[in-house]
Amino acid sequence: MDDRLQPLRTAIDAVDRQLIDLLNQRAQLAMEVGRIKHEAGAPVYRPEREAEVLRKIGTLNAGPLTEAGVTGIWREVMAACRALERPVTVAFLGPHGTFSEMALQKQFGNAVLREPCASIDDVFRAVEAAGAEYGIVPVENSTEGSVTRTLDLLLATPLKIIAEVALPVHHNLLTLDGSMKQVKRICAHSQALAQCTEWLGHHYPDIERAPVSSNGEAARLASTDPAVAAIAGDIAAQRYGLMAVATHIQDDPQNRTRFVVLGKQDTTPQSAPGRDKTSLILAVPNKAGAVFHMLAPLDAHGVSMTRFESRPARSGTWEYWFYVDIEGHEKDPKVARALDALREVCAFYKSLGSYPAAG
């Protein structure tokens, strides 16, 4: 067998040398890009550019590597090259080991500085006060719906949404030794507990369920107390040295959470149409037909709406904020015309930004 493998290993070594040379050529080009950006005062991280690169790489791939495998490799290549320009700091809902950190890793790669925050409010504050350049927060879950605290904070923040991340959420039940013999309570974020209600009710109906600030915090508690089991993801199990009692315990096997990246910069439209989204917060006078008239400009200009949700305005008069996502970038001509018309019929209008749509 060794006689047959040796020529292949020699060929692989030769390819590896070529790859290293090419990767360093790419890194040199990225450093030159960084110098130009620095002179122009432009941001290091451009989510729309990175989305375009990943899409092109996916179309160039002829296999046998999967598209997901190739784009995963390229995301780390871009992250390493970006760090040569200048490392960026990203705030997320901590502690380490949360799904927010997993979303951060999926979007930015590993070559970033991570700033764990105790709450979603603290993520917003960190970016607003320039303690971090970017923040990533959950905005909605396919099972439990919107993260209302994020929606409320988006209303007041000067920050913009510059990217989104869709993350499959696979919950594991974790303990120190992989058993439930000593466990007296199961800890997790309240949404994670809700997403596993049926499974927990069937398998451990008599064990107390205790909501905590995050799944990462639940994992940290479980790592120090054998009486605690945590619901958390793989990244938390690895970081805190926990073992799985059971995996994929979420009630919905298709459970996903959508995260948004917050920053202070604007994005540019992508070259391929239909690759961007725009998020808005709107309000209309409290009178008959107001919501119909609010949405009419989108229909008139052929702009598709992908999300529509209302939140009480807390004014005591049954008024509402409407959170709307539409297809397209606000600089696209037909979207721009629709938004101009929207401003005329809305009592309140706020653009949260345009950004590359998650794949």
Image: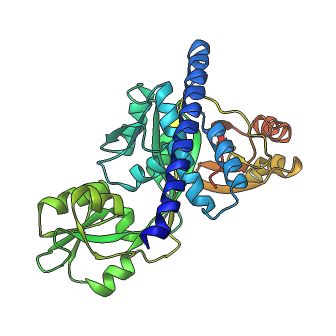
Residue at x 59% of width, y 52% of height: 71
Residue at x 31% of width, y 55% of height: 214
Q: Residue furthest bottom?
A: 202
**What is the total number of numbered labels drawn onto the structure image?**
0
Q: As rendered, which of 280 and 343 lies closer to the eye? A: 280
The figure's colour scheme reads: rainbow
Q: Which residue lies furthest to the top in this view?
A: 39
**In this image, 331 relative to 28: left or right?**
right
Residue 42 shows up from this direction? no
Residue at x 58% of width, y 43% of height: 163
- Quadrant in which the N terminus is drawn: bottom left
Q: Where is residue 186, by image quadrant?
A: bottom left
Residue 346 shows up from this direction? yes
Q: Residue 207 appears at what percent x and percent y?
A: 20, 78
Relative height, residue 254 to residue 335 (above, below): below
Q: Residue 311 appears at what percent x and percent y?
A: 55, 52
Q: As rendered, which of 212 and 237 lies closer to the eye? A: 237
- Quadrant in which the C terminus is drawn: bottom right
Relative height, residue 158 to residue 48 (above, below): above
Q: As rendered, which of 146 and 218 lies closer to the eye? A: 218
Q: Residue furthest right?
A: 300
**In this image, 198 relative to 43: left or right?**
left
Residue at x 12% of width, y 68% of height: 226
**In this image, 249 relative to 264: left or right?**
left
Relative height, residue 176 to residue 345 (above, below): below
Q: Residue 52 appears at what percent x and percent y?
A: 69, 43
Q: Residue 224 appears at what percent x and percent y?
A: 12, 59
Q: Where is residue 279, by image quadrant?
A: top right
